[in-house]
Amino acid sequence: MAEPIRQTNKEYMMTYANSLSLLVIAFLIWFIYGPWQKLWIDWARERMFASRDEIFIIAAEGGLSFDSEEYRVIRTAIESLIRYTHKVSFLRFVLLLQISKEIKNSRPNPMEMVIRIQNDQVRDRVRRQLVIAVKSCVFMMILRSPILWLPAFVVFILREVFGQRTPPSIRSLGRVIVRESQINDEARVVA
């Protein structure tokens, strides 16, 4: 009769450590691609809803007319962001960046509508809310993508060290994300 194979204490500990490592990795993957995703989508939408509500309050106070093109375009842009926040991802952003130059934009740019607002205080308040909505979407996209964590951290540190404002690349990122939500909205209307 063959003698049973006995594990030494060291081999047993290695097996235990390997099993525990696999469980931790599986948990992290589940967490990052499960609750973590939903957390940041909900966070971004909450901020976008608050921005949309603030623009409504500005209009209710008489700063903007509810019937004005500026109000309708800005509100529609934020609502498109809210509606398609769950679809915003780094991969979609890269793909849309490549094809966005070829696609004709049938909708007015929301930031151009902000510039058209005559009252300086109202314009600044509306611009702030639109920027909050877009930055929330950008921040959410970064936090949902583990691939972007390290580059985003480096950019954040460099920005803090050198004290620079938002780089133009981040502003163009926001424009592309708004454009993506508009394309999704147009596709929904056509379908």
Image (cartoon, rainbow, N blue to C red):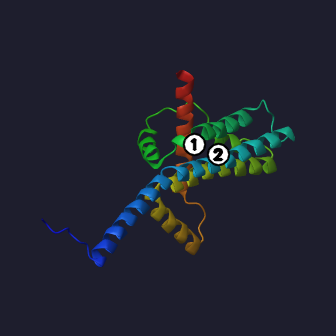
> Residue 156: image x %, image y %?
54, 66
Residue at the limit of the structure toward the top, as seen here: 191
Numbered circle sitting on residue 172: none
Name the residue that disc number 2 marks.
45
**Among the 4 quarters of the image, the one containing residue 69:** top right
Q: CA distance from mark 2 to mark 1?
A: 7 Å
Q: Nearer the viewer, residue 182 or 101?
A: 182
Amino acid type for the residue under numbered disc 1:
Thr
Q: Quadrant of the N terminus?
A: bottom left
Q: Nearer the viewer, residue 35 or 19?
A: 19
Q: Secondary structure at mark 2?
A: helix
The answer to whether one can see residue 109 in this image is no
Amino acid type for the residue under numbered disc 2:
Arg
Q: Residue at x 52, y 27 (%)?
A: 187
Q: Residue at x 65, y 44 (%)?
A: 111
Question: Between disc 2 and disc 1, whose residue precedes?
Answer: 2
> Residue 16: image x %, image y %?
36, 69
> Residue 9: image x %, image y %?
30, 77
Binning the other alpha carbons within 10 Å of mark 2 as few (below 14), some (14 to 19) or many (20 upward) gives: many
Q: Nearer the viewer, residue 187 or 149?
A: 149
> Residue 24: image x %, image y %?
43, 62
3 sits left or right of 41 in the view: left
